[in-house]
Image: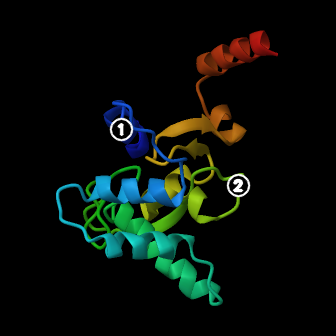
Amino acid sequence: MNNYEKLAISANRGVKLPEWRSAKSLWLIYLYKFRNYQVHKDTISDFVRNLKKIGRDQQVRHLAADEELKIVYDNRCVNCGALENHHHPRFRDTIVVLQKGHIDPNKPEVLENIIPQCQICNQTYKDNFVYDENGYIKAINNENFVLRSKPEVLKRIYELLKKKF
């Protein structure tokens, strides 16, 4: 369940939530992420403006958006939870560097299609999966990933696909 769905459940008392990925929904997500802190409305406005703004200098804009995106995810890898600039929880000799991971590898690298992944998860998962915004796998993207499965699993997949098509 993503943060927006959690907000939707808590708003199930007659409150209508704004459209997903609108400026107002970004406000709600920001407030939810920092719910244990006092946040000034100007801070949230700046955050949303930086995410939505299209400036002249594309590289600067992307760097600012990348940093804002990391803040939304608490500077953690969306898959394993490793904290940026700290030792990786499973590979203790590795310092975590967050990279841009695609939610859907078939779509362009735009803010709405990016999740922060540590270098280990990004290299491990590559373009094999489609994720939700919380880093959970929604679908398989690469058929070669399936082909590495055991023969009995491949047979079950074959039977399933045969029924479907």
Q: Helix, strand or loop at disc 1?
A: helix
Q: Is disc 2 surrounded by few (<14), some (14 to 19) or many (20+) residues within 10 Å?
A: few
Quadrant assignment, res 47: bottom left
Residue 97 in sight here: no
Quadrant assignment, res 89: bottom left
Amino acid found under the numbered disc labelled 1: Lys
Residue 165 in sight here: yes
Instruction: Point out the tag, 1 or 2, that comes first from the N-terminus.
Output: 1
**Is residue 2 depicted above or below 101 in this figure?**
above
Residue that badge 2 annotates: 107
User: Residue 147 vs residue 150: left or right?
Assistant: right
Q: Nearer the viewer, mark 1 or mark 2?
A: 1
Q: Nearer the viewer, residue 134 or 150?
A: 134
Q: Give the image location of residue 63, x and y in percent.
A: 51, 81
**Is residue 47 depicted above or below 104 in this figure?**
below
Amino acid found under the numbered disc labelled 2: Lys
**Is residue 140 depicted above or below 122 in this figure?**
above
Residue most toward the right? 165
Q: Are marks 1 and 2 in contact (CB under 8 Å)?
A: no
Number of marks drawn? 2
Q: Is disc 1 surrounded by few (<14), some (14 to 19) or many (20+) residues within 10 Å?
A: few
Image quarter in which the C terminus is found: top right
Q: Helix, strand or loop at disc 2?
A: loop
Q: Nearer the viewer, residue 4 or 58?
A: 4
Q: Nearer the viewer, residue 119 or 79?
A: 79
Residue most toward the front? 14
**Residue under the image location 60 percent in, 85 percent down:** 59
Image quarter in which the N terminus is found: top left
Quadrant assignment, res 139: top right
Q: Give the image location of residue 35, x and y in percent.
A: 23, 55
Q: CA distance from mark 1 to mark 2?
A: 26 Å
Residue that badge 1 annotates: 6
